Image (cartoon, rainbow, N blue to C red):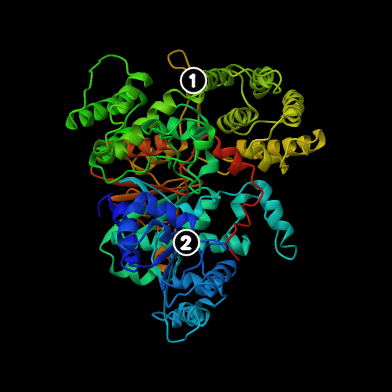
Amino acid sequence: MSAAGVLSFAQQGWEQVLAKVKWSVVYLDAACAESLHWSCGSSRLLEAVKGPACNLREFEPHAIGGGAKQPRAVFVLSSLLKGRIVDTLQDIICRSHFQHCVVVTAVSHPVHLTANHVPAAAAAELEGQQPVFEQLEEKLCEWMGNMNYTAEVLHVPLLLAPAAPHLAFTPAFATLFPLLPQDVHVLNSARPDKRRLNSLGEVDATALTPELLLYIRCLVSGLSSLCEHLGVREECFAVGSFSRVIATDLANYAPAKNRRKTATGRASVVFVDRTLDLTGVVGHHGDNLVEKIISALPQLPGHTNDVMVNMAELTAVQAVEENQTVIAPGCLAPSNDASAKALWEALLNTKHKEAVMEVRRHLVEAASRENLPIKMSMGRVTPGQLMSYIQLFKNNLRALTNHCGLLQLGMATVQTLKHPQTAKWDNFLAFERLLLQSLGDSTMAGVLNQLLPMIKSSSQRTNDDYSPEELLILLIYVYSVTGECTLDRDLGDVEEKVKRALASVFSEESELSPLLQKITGCDSAIDLTLPKSQTAVNDIFTALRETAGARNLLRQFKSVYVPGNSTHQASYKPLLKQVVEEIFNPEKPDPIDIEHMSSGLTDLLKTGFSMFMKVSRPHPSDHPLLILFVVGGVTVAEAKMVKDLVASLKPGSQVMVLSTRLLKPLNIPELLFATDRLHPDLGF
């Protein structure tokens, strides 16, 4: 039960898929492609296919079908086999010449029964049977045009994209984000005949929309498969109201009950709501090179957890705009190169300065191994120095091939160090520190007054000023770190000034970024009038105030702000740090905000008896493995902090940090100001 379990779980799933793909056309959706990307890479899939690269295709309605000499197809899908997904399958198969079709779904058969409204009692009687999959197999043969052709539908839990032995993401659930109080109003309007929900604390599974509940059940199914792979019986805990819904569903997930009876290992699974502390994501305290790379470089198309690295400088292709798409981009996901894997691990686990020195060391060693004419230089590492080492590999195909993964990480480092966003990182950090000190000396109104002069229209801004998106990041920082404060007259007045200034800036933008398009609902700057900007800004401030009050329902973890005193400056104390410290508190007090979710009558009796007798209630530190699942995303620096904390507080304990996605500051406005949290797109 090693922490490398996340990697072995992902790779074991993909080995089952690879065993099916020989001589096949393979269709993958984006989430499964991302899982493959981090688990074993597309090259491993190509090796197993034993055909040309064009045999790998994106699963979408307009995908190219199979030709007359392509009789086999494998579809690898992260979603339920229902609605639009099945329509797309039918469309592709009907215009192809397939005689053998395999459909792999990452969602288990019991969840398919739930999606098809099969009652729990009836589903229990079907244990060992797979009627939904069998019906689809018949349909596949029908669409292929011959009932004697071969069709197979199977479940493989392709849940994770493992970034490291201690860190993994769930690409299919990248949009899953905890609810806000405004969502409670929407839920109430949809249930006029039922008791009104007064707060997020009253939201349970019965109150959620059917789509969101099914989305959660798909995640729970995958996590149950992970626990089965690890051979553990899990105790479920939650910090936050949305996490409580997910933890309760996993604790009471019927298909897991038999598995738990035979499991020899034990683990604690602690779910934490991201909304309880957004400061850690939008802040710039994390002294980590990978965080800066993820923030500076463009996202890899179709991915949520990786970036594009421009590799053109290692080729003879001229750096002109029309050649931008000629060279495939590099990325961060570790390759099979042992040196690249070692460097990636070092980048994840060291501070910025040490990480840059590690990049230099690995490049020098690789150049030496290839007998390249390297000139050693000590002292401060510069982008130019790193680039000079990387350029040594140019025009040397063997060296390029041997160290391709390492060179991608080297190029990512150079491009990040030279990026204007990196120069701004220190500006953000300085302003955030100033805000922390100001919070101790003045009111929230005073803090917002400091922000007001920084809100400038596009015609007034220089490169050193903050863009509209960056202003949103600073506002989220302010409201999240401050927590709830009384809306007095002073605060109301200054909020109105900030809102007017921000609405004016939005409406005067000459071009709208994708984020502003999403927030305002306008595709172009021409459509974004001042009234529309004002409406969008009002919605933003509603979400900001709800962010400030996110910890209201907590009793122990009410604040992430530590006031300064005569010896220490004011500081930010991450909620995740507080949670981990409480879990491994040597006195083991009953956790106040870390709620245990009972998984049946035995647990309920234990809880009841503990009120009268000395019966120990389940505690998250009881077991040798802690799985910390952050619902809504996590940063590289947070994952490292958790890993290091556990190692220092309870040596010998193992920890896995799982999350819906890897976060950078700009992701938070996108997730926080989204309007579709209650209605995830499940494909039907």
Q: Quadrant of residue 220?
A: bottom left
70 in relation to 303, above or below: below
Q: Amino acid at mark 1?
A: Ala
Is residue 606 visible in the rendered image? The answer is no
3D distance between C-alphas at marks 1 and 2: 39 Å
Residue 580 bears which disc, if any? none
Residue 423 bears which disc, if any? 1
Count residues near mark 1 (Cα–Cα under 10 Å), then give few for <14, some for 14-19, many for 20+: few
Left or right of residue 157, residue 366 in this image: left
What secondary structure is marked by label 2? loop
Position in image of residue 327 (x %, y %)? 43, 40
Count residues near mark 2 (Cα–Cα under 10 Å), then give few for <14, some for 14-19, many for 20+: many
Position in image of residue 366 (x %, y %)? 22, 32
What secondary structure is marked by label 1? helix
- What residue do we see at 50% from left, 21% from top? 429
- What residue do we see at 71% from left, 23% from top? 457
Left or right of residue 97, residue 12 in this image: left
668 in relation to 501, above or below: below
- What residue do we see at 50% from left, 54% from top? 173
Position in image of residue 463 (x %, y %)? 59, 19
Q: Quadrant of residue 681?
A: bottom right
The residue identified by callout 2 is: 78
Query: Between disc 1 and disc 2, whose residue precedes?
Result: 2
Q: Nearer the viewer, residue 143 or 233?
A: 143
Is residue 134 visible in the rendered image? The answer is yes
Q: Nearer the viewer, residue 436 or 18?
A: 18
Position in image of residue 598 (x %, y %)? 44, 61
* Image quarter in which the C terminus is found: bottom right
Q: Amino acid at mark 2?
A: Ser
